[in-house]
Image (tube, grey):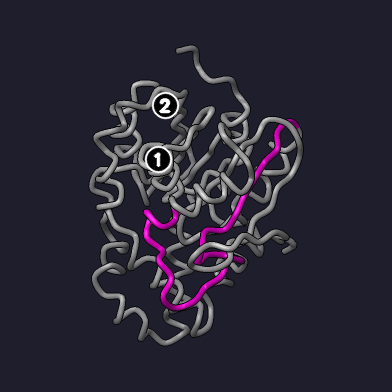
Amino acid sequence: MDWSLDEGFETPGGVVRWGALGSGEPLVLVHGTPYSSLLWRDIAPALARTRKVFFFDHLGFGQSEQREGQDLSLAAHSENFARLLDHWGLSRPSVVAHDIGGAVALRTLLLGRRSYRDLTLFDAVSGGPWERGLFRLFLEHEEVFNQLPGYAHEALVAAHLCHATHIGFRPGILDAFLAPWRGEDGQAAFYRQYSQIRQADTAAYEQLLNSISIPVRIVWGREDRILPPQYAEWLHERVPTAELHWIEGAGHLLQEDAPARLLACLTAEFAPA
């Protein structure tokens, strides 16, 4: 599959790969874990018909650099995101964020003091008690998972990815998402990043959510099994400017389950304040 990030940006932890399409008002797409900017392969070109769209792979993910010793915490991802915004010369972009990308975008807004024109969060980590399920096991037993035989690791990652979609992946897509996590180095990189993502990094800004004054749109798949609907309601209750939209028959990966309906949300006007 041809999805290449042609640009590189040097961070303290390594090179972050990024790309951009289109022209017009800037819009930045922020992915989550264990995915990559490949999630935006259909969304970015459509948005780029009217906007300048920026996308990137977090450090340690996708086409960005993976190596031992990287700081892959949400705080570090937020700092790298702020550096990218500065590198791109963006002072008030629109931001669209998914999964842990939501936490990265919120930390950058609330603690990094960067400004956005507006913010869309969908099926996103934002706060509350989200250290749960398989994710908690990754946190607590990194050394065990790192010792899994390669076939067992690959089967686990494939099952985890498939659990995020309600309708299943199109041909070739699952394999593309698996590719960065294969082999000895990929396996180490997979558990390295999960072992550093902590709830404490969202607790640090939770008390500031009610201070958000820019337009915020929350979009959520009704069948999300990774972050069930109560997480959307939790966020909606705490952000005074937020509007909430449900997408029926879709899971955690709206980009895969309902790309047309997601795109309709991303191109609609925000509700009047």
Q: Is residue 48 above or below residue 154?
A: above
Q: Which residues are magenta?
A: 50-77
Query: Which numbered disc covers residue 106?
Result: 1
Query: Which numbered disc covers residue 244?
Result: 2
Q: Residue at x 45, y 27 (%)?
A: 216
Task: Name which quarter of the figure residue 243 lies in.
Answer: top left
Task: Name which quarter of the figure residue 17 lies in.
Answer: bottom right
Estimate the x, y position of residue 239 in percent, counting from the top left.
34, 27
Disc 1 marks a residue whose amino acid type is Leu
For residue 174, say whether it is visible: no
Q: Is residue 235 above or below residue 140?
A: above
| Residue situated in front as seen by the camera: 111 or 162 | 111
The mark closer to the camera, 2 or 1, is 1
Disc 2 marks a residue whose amino acid type is Leu
Q: Residue at x 54, y 68 (%)?
A: 14
| Residue situated in front as seen by the camera: 5 or 253 | 5
Residues under numbered marks 2 and 1 in contact, where contact means CB atoms less than 8 Å apart: no
Q: Is residue 58 above or below residue 130?
A: below
Query: Which numbered disc covers residue 213?
Result: none
| Residue situated in front as seen by the camera: 3 or 16 | 16
Looking at the rendered image, the quarter that the N terminus falls into is: bottom right
